Image: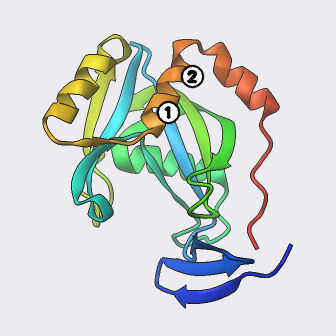
C-alpha cells in the first residue's frame, strides 16, 4: 500500500491523498466509539446536538472520539463507557462490542466501532463536556418511528446510524451474529 501524501494538516483533521484518491483523516484521535444504549424498559437513549458542518441540530446515537484526551492510546471499551456517561448520564453494566466499520468509506479512513450498552443506570444528567450542548432523549422503541418523524418535522436532521441500530434492535440475535463475524478495523497508517 502506498504512503499517503498530506495536503493539509489542521488541529483535528488532515487531507491526505493515496494514488488519485483524496480523503480526510483524523489527527487527534485513533477511532470512534458509537454506543447503542438500550434501557431495561426497551427504550433507546439518543442525543441531540447542533452540528456545525450541517448547521443544524441532529439526533444521533451517543458517540465520541477515542484517544483524543489525556491518553492517546485509550482502549475502545473504556472510551465507549466514558462517552456514554459524559453525553447521556447513563452507566452501562454491559458494553458489547459488535461491529467495526467505516464511517464514510469514500470520504475518510475513519473507522467506527459499535457497542451495545445494556444494564443502564442513570447516574448523572449528561449533556456532554464543556464544549458540547447535548440534550438527552430516552425514547421507547415502539414509538421510535413517530418520534423520529416528529423531529424531522421540527427541522432536525437524523444521523443514518440510527437506522442501523433500529435494524439490529429489531431482532437482538442480529447483534450476536454480526459480532461473531466482525473483525477489528485495520490500523491506520
Q: Quadrant of residue 114?
A: top right
Which image quarter holds the C terminus? bottom right
Question: Residue at (57%, 31%) from the top-left corner?
Answer: 116
Q: Quadrant of residue 182?
A: top right
Question: Residue at (50%, 33%) from the top-left corner?
Answer: 36
In the picture, measured across the screen, residue 189 lies left or right of residue 106, that is right
Q: Which mark is residue 36?
A: 1
Question: Residue at (26%, 51%) from the top-left corner?
Answer: 49
Of all residues, the one furthest to the left in this rendering is: 154
Which residue, given by chain and number where applicable, does mark 2 sit on? 168
* Residue 141 visible, this angle: yes
- Between circles 1 and 2, the one closer to the viewer is 2
Is residue 181 placed above or below 15 in the rendered structure? above
Is residue 26 placed above or below 171 in the rendered structure? below
Q: Position of residue 148 (x, y in %)?
A: 27, 27
Q: Position of residue 152 (x, y in %)?
A: 21, 34
Of all residues, the one furthest to the right in this rendering is: 1
Which image quarter holds the N terminus? bottom right
Is residue 187 placed above or below 19 in the rendered structure? above
In contact (CB < 8 Å): disc 1 and disc 2: yes
Counting the numbered discs, the total is 2
Using a 10 Å C-alpha cutoff, classify the residue at mark 2 as few (fewer than 14 neighbours), some (14 to 19) or many (20 or more). some
Q: Nearer the viewer, residue 104 or 183?
A: 104
Amino acid at each position: 500500500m502506498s504512503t499517503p501524501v498530506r495536503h493539509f494538516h489542521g488541529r483535528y483533521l488532515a487531507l491526505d491523498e493515496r494514488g488519485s484518491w483524496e480523503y480526510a483523516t483524523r489527527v487527534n484521535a485513533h477511532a470512534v466509539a458509537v454506543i447503542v444504549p438500550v434501557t431495561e424498559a426497551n427504550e433507546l437513549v439518543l442525543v441531540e446536538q447542533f452540528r456545525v458542518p450541517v448547521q443544524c441540530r441532529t439526533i444521533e446515537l451517543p458517540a465520541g472520539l477515542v484517544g483524543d484526551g489525556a491518553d492517546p492510546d485509550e482502549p475502545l471499551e473504556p472510551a465507549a463507557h466514558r462517552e456514554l456517561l459524559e453525553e447521556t448520564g447513563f452507566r452501562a453494566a454491559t458494553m458489547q462490542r459488535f461491529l467495526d466499520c467505516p464511517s464514510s468509506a469514500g470520504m475518510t479512513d475513519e473507522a467506527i466501532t459499535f457497542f451495545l450498552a445494556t444494564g443502564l443506570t442513570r447516574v448523572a444528567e449528561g449533556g456532554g463536556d464543556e464544549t458540547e450542548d447535548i440534550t438527552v432523549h430516552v425514547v421507547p422503541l415502539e414509538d421510535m418511528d413517530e418520534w423520529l418523524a416528529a423531529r424531522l418535522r421540527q427541522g432536525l436532521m437524523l444521523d443514518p446510524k440510527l437506522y442501523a441500530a433500529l435494524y439490529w434492535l429489531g431482532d437482538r440475535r442480529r447483534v450476536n451474529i454480526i459480532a461473531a463475524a466482525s473483525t477489528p478495523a485495520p490500523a491506520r497508517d
